[in-house]
Image (cartoon, rainbow, N blue to C red):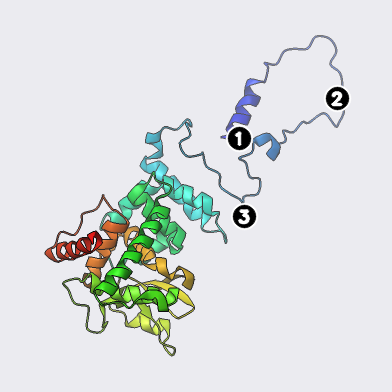
Amino acid sequence: MSMYSYLQKRILNVKSPQKRKGPRPERSSSTKRRHIDFSPSDQGEDYDADSSGGSTILLPPRGSSEDDSSADKDSPAAQARHYKTLQEMYKKPKPNQDAVCQILDLEFQSRRAFIDSGILKEEDRPAKIFEAYPCFKELHHVMDELRRILAKDNSKFINEVKKRWADFCSMVQFYGVWRKVLKPPMSLGAVESNIALFRALPTLFPSPSAPPKKMGQASEALLHVLQPTEEPAIYLQKRTLFSPVLVFDGSRCLLAIGNTPVTTFAKEELGEGLLYLMGYYYTLHLTYPKCVATILSVIQTEVLQDSIHDRDTTGSYKRVMAEWNAFIKK
């Protein structure tokens, strides 16, 4: 658009040629040929002369009233252009993350239509989506996608979710001690307290379906703590579920989906690990494992406050929530 405006201005300022009266002066060799210099200063601030390396693709600001209408922005052709731009950005070693977020905002409609369509089998869906959208191997893009799905216009949604999650975990600590499932957390460090909480959640909010025999406890569908001699790759190959899981080795936390490792994060963030799992369930449109469906449904309603998707209406879920609400009122 900057180039177009520049050329249009040049064209409008050109006068029609007129015959010169009188003798024509001779031109020096230095003035016989004149070149138009398209320097970056002439082209406006949005032009990036270096299209390689760390150059940034600048897009019109959100909500701007450009020549193209909102209908054109949502058209299949426009959505396809946005996706192509995103692909080009991820061919670079370090894509500009702000520009990636903006492209994901613009291409949201067609992306969700592709992911939610049910064309892909659930066990194949993560690999296919990561191939099409490598940005979703990064936690901040997954959490931002969760915001787009549940509260697109609420820029503070993730901070609000984290606050509700902290309040929920605090109440569950008391609930677990009251139910004699958890010990008082005062004697535990932050990491040990989070591990104990995650292991207790499927017991405090039980699902009617038992976990697979090879898996052992239902909490293994949420978190697995590696033994000192246990290798994460070997553990993942033995997994029988295709769902997201946290694998903790004592120093860092690995988030995997099925048998495939996706990303890692610091142990200080372990307390928010279940929110990351929920982010991947929503982003990749995955089904909850039956053995932990109740606790994940509780997080969906109590923490994410999802008003878009259907809520669990089974008798076991209603019973669990009745016990939980009765405890909160005390």
Q: Which of marks 2 and 1 is nearer the N terminus?
A: 1
- The spot of residue 80 in percent (x, y) is 41, 47
Q: Distance between the residues labelled 2 and 3?
A: 44 Å
Q: Can residue 197 be seen in this view?
A: yes
Give the number of marks. Answer: 3
Q: Which residue is drawn at 47% across and 31% down?
A: 65
Q: Are marks 2 and 1 in contact (CB under 8 Å)?
A: no
The quarter of the picture where the N terminus appears is top right
Label 3, on which residue? 54
Mark before the other along the chain sequence, 3 or 1: 1
Q: Looking at the picture, which amino acid does disc 3 mark?
A: Gly
Please tell me which residue is depicted at 41% across the width and 38% down the height of the picture. 73
Label 3 and label 1: CA atoms lie apart by 21 Å
Which x, y percent locates residue 278? 34, 62
Horizontally, is 268 left or right of 221 in the view?
right
Figure quadrant of residue 299: bottom left
- Which amino acid does the dot numbered 1 rest on? Met
Tell me residue 177's x, y (percent).
29, 74
* Residue in the picture at 49% in, 52% down: 100
Above or below, 203 against 317 in this view is: below
Q: Around disc 1, counting alpha carbons within 10 Å, would you say few (fewer than 14), some (14 to 19), or many (20 or more)?
A: some
Is residue 121 in sight in this rendering?
A: no
Q: Is mark 2 on a helix, strand or loop?
A: loop
The residue that disc 1 covers is: 3
**Percent position (x, y) of residue 216?**
26, 83
Most foreground residue, 276 or 43: 276
Which mark is nearer the camera, 3 or 1? 3
Q: Name the residue under label 2.
A: 27
Secondary structure beneath disc 1?
helix
User: Foreground residue, 76 or 267?
Assistant: 267
Of circles 2 and 1, the one toward us is 1
